Structures are given as C-alpha cells and as structure tokens.
Amino acid sequence: MTNSVSEIRNASCFFVIGSNTTATHPVIGRQINAAVRGGAKLIVADPRETMLCRIADVWLRHQPGTDVALLNAMARVIIEEKLLDTSFIKERCDGFEAFEETVMAWDLSQAEEITGVPIKKISEAARMYASVSPATILYAMGITQHSHGTDNVKAVANLALLTGHIGKPSTGVNPLRGQNNVQGACDMGALPNVFTGYQKVEDPEIRKKFEEAWGCRLSSSPGLVLTEFFEAIHSGKVKALYLIGENPVLTEADTGFIEEAISRLELLVVQDVFLTETAQLADVVLPAASFAEKDGTFTNTERRVQRVRKAIEPVGNTRPDWMILCEIAQDMGAKGFDFESPEQIMEEIRTLTPIYGGITYERIDGVGLQWPCPDTKHPGTPYLYGERFTTPSGRGQITPISYSSPAEVTNHEYPLILTTRRSTFHYHGTLSRKVAGLNALRSEEQLEINPVDAAALEIEDGESVKVISRRGTVLAKTKISKITPPGVVSMTFHYAETRTNILTHAALDPVAKIPEFKVCAVKIEREIDYSTEYWGWGTGKD
Amino acid sequence: MTNDKRQMTNNKQPMTNNTTVTINGLDVKVPEGATILEAAHIAGIYIPTLCYCPGLTSEGTCRICLVKIENKKRLHPACRTPVKDGMVVITDDPEIERLRRVTLELILSDHDFNCLLCPKSGTCRLQELVNRIGFDEQRLNRLNWVAKDLPIDTSNPFFDFNPNKCIQCGICVRTCREISGVDAIAMGYRGYDLKVSTFGDKSLKESVCVSCGECVERCPVGALVPKNIQYPTREVKTTCVYCGVGCGLYLGVRGNSIVRARGDCENPVNRGELCVRGRFGYGFVHSPDRLSSPLVRAYDPLERTAHGMDETGRPGKPLTAPLVKREGRFVEVNWEQAIKYVSSTLVHYKGDEFAAVSSAKCTNEENYLFQKFVRAVMQTNNIDHCARL
C-alpha cells in the first residue's frame, strides 16, 4: 500500500476495484464503511455484488477480465472533460502524450460493449474519482490474478497519476496484500530475482555485498518463479523441492498438472504445521511451530513491521521454522547460520537491507514501524511517493495500455465464466479449516450462480452439480443468488473436498507470472442427469 | 455533507478547550461540542452509564446517566447532551439518585439473575451499577420480579446470545451498524417484548451475521458471551496470522494453551477491532491434526532393518529405528534423524536442480533465513513464495 491503513478513514473518495474488502480484509472494509457513512464517496468496480456495492455511490458491474477497458474508458473521460491534474503530470510524470493518443483512440461505446457497463456510469465514476479529494484506490487479487494482471495494475496507476491522486495522506494506490506476511516475504527476498529489500541479483555491486556478508559465491541469474517451478519439475529440470508452509495442490491453478509434476520429483521436503494435501506427497515432513509458538516479525500490507511473540511452548515435538533451517544449514557445513534468536537474524537483515536499516526489536516493540526506515533515527514512512517515485528518473510513468481479452473466453461448449473468491470465514484453508467453529459457519463449497442461469440449467438451490472446465471436474453445491451476474459463476478455493483450482486456468501474466484465477470458462451439469435416467412413470417416451 | 466541509473535518485542528462548564461546582474547560459525560470524565467526576460505549454514537436509551442542568426543567442524559458555555450541571443529588435507582430497578425487574453462574460476573456493568446505585428490595418485589424465559440462541459456534440477560441497551445493535457495518441485528417487537433480533427473528447463524464478535466484546452484561469462556492467566501481545491487514492482538494464555484473543487498542491498524478469523480463529494451534513429529517416507532397502519402527496413525509412540517407506506410508523419526536425512540428501541437489517455496505465513526472519539458505548453501535463485496465489 502506498498509504497507511489508519489514513483510510480520512479519504473522501474510494475507488475499490477487484477487492471484496469486507470479506477478505474485514478490518479495512469496516473503515471504508465508516468513512462512507460519514459522507465519503464510494465507487466499486466488481462483477460480483459484494457488501460494499450496497453502500456504493456508483457500482460498475463489468465483465470479469475487462478491467483495462473500463479503466481506459475512465481515463478517456478524465482527459476529455479536463479533470486532469496538469501541473502534477507536468512536474512529476512522463509519457502522458503517448498515453493520451492510445486512450483517445479508444471509443467509449466500445468500452460499453466490452465491459457491459453503461457509458453514463463510467463517466459518473470517472468524474467522481477525479474531482473529489483525497481519493484513494484500493485493489486486490481481482486486478492482479489475470493473464494481463500487470496491465491492469498499470491502468490503475495511470488513473492515479492523471489525477494526481498519489503521494499525499489518504491519497494513493493501495493493493491489499493477501497473506499476513506476504509483504514481508517479498521484502526478505523470498523471490527469484531479488535479495532483501528488492536489491536485484543481477547487480554485481549488490551481489558483492551479499557475497562478502555471507562468505560464499552467489548465482547472478534470476531463478524461476513459483508458477514456472512445476513446468520445470515436469520436464525434469528441477529434481528437488523444499516447501515451507505452502500447499500448491490446493492453491495453484490447474492442480491436476501440479500433482503430476510433484509425482516426478526425486525429493520433496515439506515443512508445515499440518499434514497438508501436498505434505501427504512428500518424502520428508518437518513439523513446524505455529505463529503463537515463536518470536519474530510480520510486515503487513501498509509496510508496518510488527512483532510476533511466543505465547506458548511449541506444541508436541514441533520446532520453529528458523531453528529447523539453522540446523539443516549447519549440518550441511554452512557458515553463518549459528543464530540463537530471531532478534539476531533481524540484526543481520538490518545491515544488508537499506529499507529495513532502522528496524530493531527495541524500536518496533510498541506499534511497529513502516518501511522505508533507513536508520535508527528515522520515524518510518506512513505514505510513499511524496517527493519522488521509485523509478530511475524519479518520475511517474503513465503507460499506454491496450485491452486484451482474458486467455480463456466462453464458447458454446463452456458458456459460463468461473471467477474465484474468498469467504469471510476462511483464509486459504490450511489454518482456518482446522478451526471447528469456522468450519461450522461455512463447511462446504458454495457455487454462486445467478437465477437466470440456474433456471436455464434447471438447477435448484443447494443441489450438487458438476462444474466442468477444460482441465477437470469438481462437484459443488449451488447457491442461487443475484450476487453473481448472469453468465458468471463464483467459487472459493478453501476446500480440499472441492478443489476449485482443478478448474482454473494456468495462463500466466507475461511479466508477473501470475495465473488467471479470476477468469476461466466452465459448464455446469446436474449431478444426476434426469434426461437419461429413468425415474418411474412419466418420462414421456415410448 | 459537502466535500469541502468533509475535508475540513479531516484536517482537524488540535482541539482547543474553549468551553467552560460547571459540574458539581467544579469549573471545567472542555472542547466545543463535548458531551456532559465527556466533560465529567475530564473533570474526573463519575457518572454511571449503561448504554454508553466509547466509539459508538450515544442513544441515551438506558436513562442511567441523567443529570440536572440549571434552568432546565427536565433531566438530561449526560451521554448525548452537548455542553454549552457557562452551563451549570449537577450529577448527583437525592432526586437524581432516586430516579437512577428506580430506573435500575425497572431494568433489574426482568433480568435473569444467576450471577454466580454467569460468565460475566465480576466484569458485568449491571453488577457495578447495582453496587453503586443500589435498589430497594421491597419495591423490586412489587415490580413483579419475573425473569423472562426466552430461548437462548446457541447457533453461532463462537458465542451465545441469552435474551433473558439482555438489558436492551442497544450497544450490540449500534456496534453491528457502526463498527462492523453489517446490520445483522436490530431491536425487534414492542414494549415488554422488545428484544434484539435478527431479520425475521432467525437464529444468528442463519442471519447475515459475520461472527466478528465485536458485539460480544462490547456487551455490558452476560447476554452475549463467548462459548466455553476461560479467563487467561497471562496475555501476550502479538500480530494476527490470517490476512495482510496485520491487526495487533493479545493472545490470552492459560497453562500452555490459548484461550482467548482480543484486539490491541493501541495498534494503529485495528485500534482494538478484529474479524471472525482473528478473534476466534486461533483454534488451529491446538488442533489434534497438528503434526507432532518429523515424518519420513523411508525406502524399501532399509525395511529389512526396521525393527520397532512406528507408523503414523499412532501418534505419540517414540521412534527407535531409522525409517522405511512403505507405499503411501510415513514413519515417525526423531529430529536428529530427520535433519540428517534432509541435509545429506540436499547435498546432491545443489544448483538449479533445486527449488524452494517459502511461506507468506512465516516470519520475516524465517523468510530471510530460507532465501539465504537457498542462495548461499543450495547455490540457486530458485526461491519464491505464494505472492501470486
């Protein structure tokens, strides 16, 4: 997030796109709610009728996967009606002319046709976002999990740059990060192309710094990304895989392929809290301690590094992950793994990571600190890009983006679009499914389907149906509701019993390598086919 | 509210104490627009309240905080009467005392008294008021002291709603509307039958309630209480493990188990609030499905030597010999064996034949250590985590 969570309540206009905030990030969702009750404007763009849609001033119900068309159309309205922040563009941005050219070539009626949103609504949303300040954009996986996710993000950023809605308190572009420490995992360099603090592995200077600190030679070529791992495993390039707290059999797209790849591994080590679906396929399973049994830090979506403290002794014969890793590394004869506490590890992180330079356990004891925090006197950074952007020139890039359709479109055989979502009561599933109460609240998959489609397929509410995509079939109970528009069905991916990701499409975004979870073509069949099975009298035949 | 006005309220100037009120003869300087109750808090004067809850709008339904204002005929609820410059307020005198006692007696007259068995006992606001204000037993008896006998809603897996203990203060209703924004509950029925109800008077589980438990946290009496409540012996400040918001929370520990989670009011992210996962989702820590010992799929050649070997499915048995794979079976090993197994095997896969997936559920320190291990020891950059999923 470019801004802080506590700034949200002070914004006067929200543009929420591709985020079911009240379900996935409830505490942030509540702040939007409170601000809207206090008079702030709310624009929601979502194919599904999320809770926020009900209190929104404008709800843009676009077709899944048409975000770029929608955002470009909004940009065109902003340019046409001269709602731009011209001084901001002049002083701080590059690329406006090229952008203007592509966007003005883009016809609004074309956008209406593609997105299914009336021009009037698009214009209203654009005017509202451009003219009310402070205005903030919140987005989540609904923007990123597409085969053109990077384009979507850039299109979102363009809107903020055009209107100058960035780099001020309560004003910015705020991706809501998913897992509790996904921000921290990225910051710590658990990525194939960067060391800690996004320092590139290709940079010889930086490599030298790490080689000296760690006392070893380091590879200069970026590694594979997670979504490419399984291709490499399948083709035999990668033979050993070490997973910590990850369950790709449930969470990756096209899981049938993933399972086949895993079966070809020579060695699979899984370190987890539970014997997950993936751990069941492992050669070695190492039991890890949970968050309540160890010390450390998490970095949240607003870049705040906060303490995690040990509340209880490790359950059973488990050990904290850091301890296990230290022991394995030392057993392999490696130097520099003789840590006695997470605090010592943080001291090492601090010396190698400029953005974490001022983060010590002592300083973050109370409420944490938001990076960038380069030294121990720095108070942390509540919002980013106040002075300059993190581009080489320090200027914001307005990038021309053209719309491309999702990788998989519906056809006669697979007429419905499946889009995945999260439930309020579960997170990814490994943890929340083990909580009896949360399970009681939502114990099984619900396939949301519009009454129009349900009537056409003669499906009843609560009936078990087969959901079929080009990659596989799962069974799910239906929930007939107007939450999803006609032609779109929606499922979660929390349930090992209903592996939704067997259906999803592994088409990757070319830059971010993120799979297209949000759009895949499916068809739905009744589990019992009444037209072929004989049900007593009255079939009307013979 | 127009946009300009809103912006003005956003950029709040530091409040100046420019209004003077006299409470019980004490002069107090308070900011403009403060209520009498807030002024009294500043002056350090106690006014009993029941339906007042900081952070929510005040409705003044309980009539416990009534105070006298000079030159005004009626008594006014302190929680929703704003102060005016020069206002003279009296918070206690025999007349106010008497009125409060009668009001309290009316609330008590249909309250389900079994304080000894009530989990709220000791922290109950009604108990506190009874001790402060007192009641006249004879009069209470005359009020036909009958407890209601309404069914208890136990449908929610995390908390129960006992309407017999409810005092209709409306804090839960306001919480659901103003804090959670869900509007799952409201006051239903009329007169004596007035009660907190969901849409269509269905059970909480069938309603749109998201089980966030904010109302449970704020209920002043024993009407909304967590199931299987256990008070912790100590609390540990930590950060929630579910989503990226990173709410600060206190885990209540009793023995070696977690019995409660509550929001950290000082944390700037959540300011004491939590969602259903954060407040009630800690149960996985003590799940019987937790892995308790390292497991190895050992391979056939070893099987001949495998005496006394234990298989999974019978947890808790100590393992005495190296382990052996049988198709689809794991065997428990001790940590030394497991570490040895992993380190001695990994040696053969150094370089780009190796790949590692770190976890967005682990701490920063563990992620750092893992990427260091992969890069420095395994000599590859094939490390990633679930940021894309």
Image: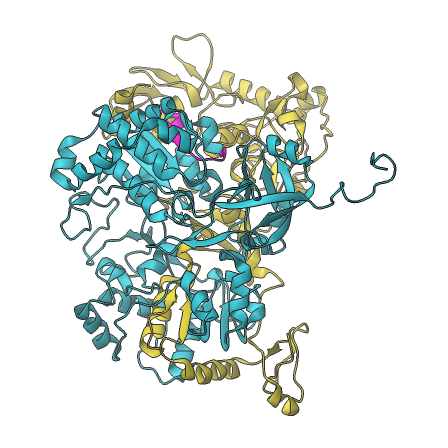
Chain colours: A cyan, B yellow
Residue in the image at 56% along x and 44% along y: A414
In x, y percent, where is residue A379? Answer: 22, 50
Is A43 rendered above or below residue A328?
A: above
In x, y percent, where is residue A278? Answer: 54, 65
Q: Is residue A280 magenta?
A: no
Dividing the image into 4 quarters, which one contains the C terminus of chain A? top right
Q: Is residue A42 magenta?
A: yes
Residue in the image at 40% along x and 75% along y: B354
Q: Would you say residue A51 is visible in this rendering?
A: yes
Residue furthest to the right in view is A537
Left or right for A425, reference A297: right
Magenta span: A35-50
Residue in the image at 34% along x and 42% along y: A5
In x, y percent, where is residue A462? Answer: 68, 39
Residue in the foreground of this view, choosing between B159 and A434:
A434
Quarter of the figure with residue B343 = bottom left
Q: Would you say residue A435 is visible in this rendering?
A: no
Is A332 rendered above or below residue B58?
A: below
Residue in the foreground of this view, choosing between A502 and A93:
A502
